[in-house]
Image: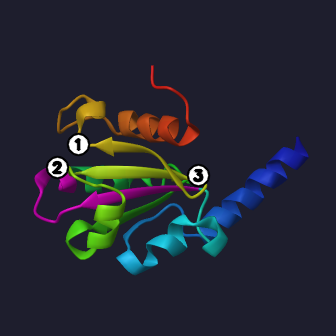
Amino acid sequence: RMYAIKKQQEKQIEWLSKQHGSYREIKQDDFFNIVVRDKGGSEDVVVHFYHADFERCKIMDSKLQDLAPMHMAAKYVKVDVQKAPFLVDKLKVTMLPCVVLFHNDVAVDRIVGFDDLGNVDDFPLELLRERIEVGLSGEELQ
């Protein structure tokens, strides 16, 4: 039991050192350093591709801002699509908001629009958290 507690504390320290628990904007040039583990990135990264003028992007932004401190296991960042044409093209981001989930350097899932969240603007934060956790774990949605 003590070993498990110690391992969890070590994990918390590692996450904090990698800025888990916060939600911030990154530039296109910083993307690979954050996502790729060999370059010091995190195991699980949630990347929100957004446009500043889109209302639903603002809603998703607000939800992710609230969720980041509650879900320390993943690093939360956002990328302005107008400033990241290479990433938008490479990751085939065609609809906004788009949240791409990375696990061990690989895009394992994405949340496009609000379809997976009840297709309503006032979806519960817990629904988004569950959707992200399931997406990062590789489990099938039920």
Q: How many marks?
A: 3
Image-quadrant location for residue 82: bottom left
Q: Is residue 116 above or below residue 29?
A: above
| Residue that label 1 marks | 113
Give the secondary structure at mark 2.
Answer: helix
Disc with the residue nearer the chain's start (1 vs 3)? 3
10 Å crowding of disc 2: few (<14), some (14-19), many (20+): some
Disc with the residue nearer the chain's start (3 vs 2)? 2
Where's residue 53, x and y in %? 10, 63
Instruction: Kindly identify which numbered label has been placed on residue 56.
Output: 2
Give the secondary structure at mark 1.
Answer: loop
| Residue that label 3 marks | 73
| Front: mark 1 or 3 | 1
Give the secondary structure at mark 3.
Answer: loop
Residue at 20% across / 54% down in the picture?
57
Residue 39 in sight: yes
10 Å crowding of disc 1: few (<14), some (14-19), many (20+): some
